[in-house]
Image (cartoon, coloured by chain):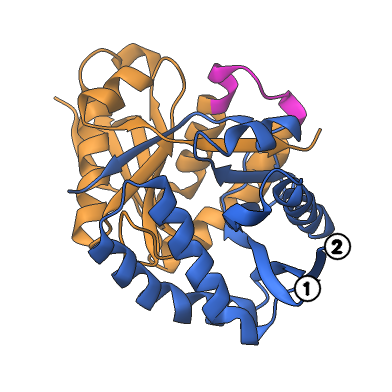
Chain colours: A orange, B blue
Amino acid sequence: MPTTRVANADDIALITEHRHSMFAEIGWSTADALTTMSEHFRPWVERMMAAGKYVGWVVEDDGQPVASAGFFELEWPPHPFDPAGEARGYLLNFWVEPSHRRRGLAKGLVKLAVAESRRRGLRVTTLHASEAGRPVYESLGFRRGGEMMLIET
Amino acid sequence: MPTTRVANADDIALITEHRHSMFAEIGWSTADALTTMSEHFRPWVERMMAAGKYVGWVVEDDGQPVASAGFFELEWPPHPFDPAGEARGYLLNFWVEPSHRRRGLAKGLVKLAVAESRRRGLRVTTLHASEAGRPVYESLGFRRGGEMMLIET
């Protein structure tokens, strides 16, 4: 029976590996970009966790990590959706090992991360979903946003 | 002939009014939410401008402000699109007075804001567009992102 715990500083390498695996599976990143990202993400997440802005969860089965996910408190201007707020919840790094998919682990992790937004009084929670991940988020009330993006190449 | 200048601390009230007008025109906000937002946005943008994280531009015609726009440096985890970066450019508060529309003022402001992203070495620039605003951004290379959003009601 898988159990879930809050991540701590000893999980920084695992969280970084899971982020790397997630983007590798989506398939639009080069190997070089993923290597550089992981080098920079690792100290970033360590710093943000220490500052209380990043919260992670790890699911273990028989003592082995099989899934993880993260929450980041994202600075945001006061907006009609949260007119007195200065932050949004941002969900990231959702990863479930292929051997443990289709058991509801991702959905359980999304619920924990949304609860973290609520605990902090944040009225807006956002994320970026792959096509494969979208149905899980929709089932929990997430809807497409109006974001547009320009990427330098 | 309209001229454009960088916004300064004396423009905080104008920037706040333009943000208010923008959301009022989109139409999905309540009057109460807009009032509360403006009360909180004003000190927020003053603080962020002083910190160098917010940059604004004001377009004047015959000495009167007729349009404005803003750039915010948004904290972001290292990501494959910008693997060594810790921030994205975020464009906000684009407003052109109805009397001065369809003259390319918005497009000129978007170009200035994208140039600010480049000046800071940020490889990703995002924004949230209304349906009316989308064609301007598309003409400059912006594409729909995969964002999803959960809003507490």
Q: Which residue occupies the foreground of this view, A138 or B97? A: B97
Q: Is residue A78 left or right of residue B107?
A: left
Q: Is residue A64 left or right of residue B93?
A: left
Q: Quadrant of the N terminus of chain A?
A: top left
Disc 2 chain ID = B
In this picture, is A50 found above or below A136? below
Range shown magenta = A23-32
Tell me, yes or no, whether the highlighted magenta stretch contains residue A111.
no
Q: Is residue A2 left or right of residue A136?
A: left
Name the amino acid type tagged 2.
Met
> What residue is at 49 percent from the left and 71 percent from the top?
B17
Q: Main secondary structure of the magenta part?
A: helix
- State the mark number for residue B62: 1
Secondary structure under badge 1? loop
Q: Quadrant of residue B83?
A: top right
Disc 1 chain ID = B
Q: Which residue has dot 2 on it?
A: B1
